[in-house]
């Protein structure tokens, strides 16, 4: 952002690219979600991070509730929801401290969360083949996000 813009809660205004990096999804997905009303915009390519994360979490919860078929789809939706809930809580905590956290803190929190989820899955009664599919999906998500963040 070339000029310092603020949202109503003092976190600033995120561009499409920054919102995508923050949520760990592509800018195209941000635009798609904005067009469909999942993520609210406050202007052309501008987002309030609190409202965007909150709306995205709500959408993920709805997806979780509607998930049907394989357990993997439900597990993936639950994983996404847990990651996004963690981000929202981090944003709310940072608001109380009157500062926005840096991306390293977010990456660290996500790694800890995914590690915890991995332990839960590892100790569950899910078939070993399904567990491996889930671990692969979690690793792929982490690798894609780290690669995107390093660009």
Image (cartoon, rainbow, N blue to C red):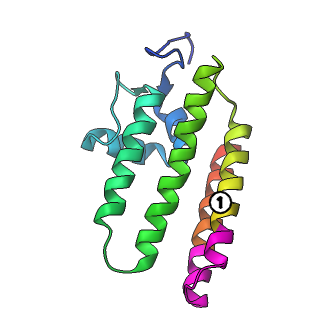
Rendering quarter of residue 134: bottom right
Name the residue: 68% across, 62% down: 116
Rendering quarter of residue 135: bottom right
Rendering quarter of residue 101: top right
Span highlighted in magenta in the image:
118-134
Position of residue 115 in the picture relative to residue 84 (left or right)? right
Q: Depth check: give the residue in front, 24 or 118.
A: 118
Element assignment for label 1: helix
Query: Can the viewer see residue 151 in this picture?
Result: no
| Percent coordinates x, y for residue 115 in the rendering | 70, 62
Name the residue: 47% across, 54% down: 81
The residue wearing badge 1 is: 114
| Percent coordinates x, y for residue 4 in the rendering | 56, 10
Q: Depth check: give the residue in front, 35 or 108.
A: 108
Position of residue 49 in the picture relative to residue 117 (left or right)? left
Asked if residue 6 is positioned above or below residue 125 in the image, the reply reads above
Q: Quadrant of the N terminus?
A: top right
Asked if residue 103 is positioned above or below residue 107 in the image, the reply reads above
């Amino acid at each position: 952002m070339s000029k310092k813009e603020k949202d109503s809660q003092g976190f600033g205004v995120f561009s499409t690219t920054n919102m995508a990096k923050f949520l760990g999804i592509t800018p195209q997905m941000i635009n798609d979600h904005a067009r469909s009303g999942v993520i609210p915009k406050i202007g052309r390519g501008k987002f309030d991070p609190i409202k965007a994360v909150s709306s995205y979490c709500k959408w993920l919860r709805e997806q979780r509730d509607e998930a049907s078929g394989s357990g993997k789809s439900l597990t993936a939706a639950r994983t996404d929801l847990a990651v996004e809930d963690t981000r929202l809580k981090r944003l709310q905590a940072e608001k109380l401290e009157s500062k926005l956290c840096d991306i390293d803190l977010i990456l660290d929190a996500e790694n800890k969360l995914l590690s915890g989820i991995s332990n839960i899955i590892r100790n569950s009664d899910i078939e070993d083949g399904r567990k491996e599919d889930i671990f692969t999906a979690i690793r792929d998500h982490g690798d894609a996000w780290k690669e995107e963040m390093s660009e």
